[in-house]
Amino acid sequence: MNKIFSLFPFAMLLMLPVTAVQSQSPAQRTDIVSSADISKESKADEAHSFVEYKAVKAALQPYIQSATTGNGEVIRTAFYDHAHIVGSAGGVFNNVNLNTFAKNISGSGPSPDVKHHIAWIDISGPAAAAKVEFINWRGNRFTDFFILYKKDGEWKISGKVYDAHSNN
């Protein structure tokens, strides 16, 4: 008997009539937004988007340069002071502030043979995200995910999460 009553709410849902919206074809429905509606941009929007992409890419350059030089002071210029860096290397979880991260970069020394690739940058207003792949940074491969914010016309990194791949 208890089983019957526990199924009662579900059974009642099955008996509800189909509404007019549910019975309309996708072409008739007004609550569906098509990808064509979302992606409509003016030429000015497209030009601005390209400029912002280049600006975010430029904001990542001090970080990328520090991978080669091992200069923690240069890496600082890419980040907001409040930034946190989270990830793991050698199987050890790390959650450090910018000061500790900059010291770690300086202490590790240069990696003159490091290569990088900016896999993607995604921008929405003053917020952005980026993925950068590094290979041969002190002999390791890293994937870095950055969160950036544009304040007073300047893009800076607010936080970073990384994976050290086979060094985990």
Image (tube, rainbow, N blue to C red):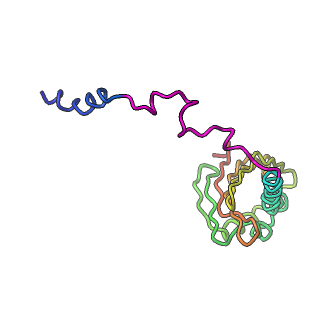
Q: Residue at x 75, y 65 (%)?
A: 155
User: 165 or 55, which lies in front?
Assistant: 55
Residue 109 lies in quadrant? bottom right
Vertical side of 30 occupied by 125: above or below: below
* Quarter of the figure with residue 71: bottom right
Left or right placement of residue 25 versus residue 160 in this view: left
The quadrant in which residue 119 appears is top right
- Is 5 on the left or on the right of 151, as rendered? left
Of the pair 41 and 21, the residue shown nearer to us: 21
Residue 102, compared with residue 13, is above or below; it is: below
* Residue 3 percent coordinates (x, y): 18, 28
Q: Main secondary structure of the magenta part?
A: loop
Q: Quadrant of the N terminus?
A: top left
Vertical position of residue 42 compared to residue 102: above or below: above
- Rendering coords of residue 32 (x, y %): 56, 38
Name which residue lies at 17% across and 31% down: 5
Q: Position of residue 38 (x, y in %)?
A: 67, 44
Q: Is residue 31 magenta?
A: yes
Q: Is residue 166 above or below residue 98?
A: above
Where does residue 126 sit, x and y in percent of width and height? 69, 62
Residue stretch in magenta: 18-43
Residue 42 among magenta residues: yes
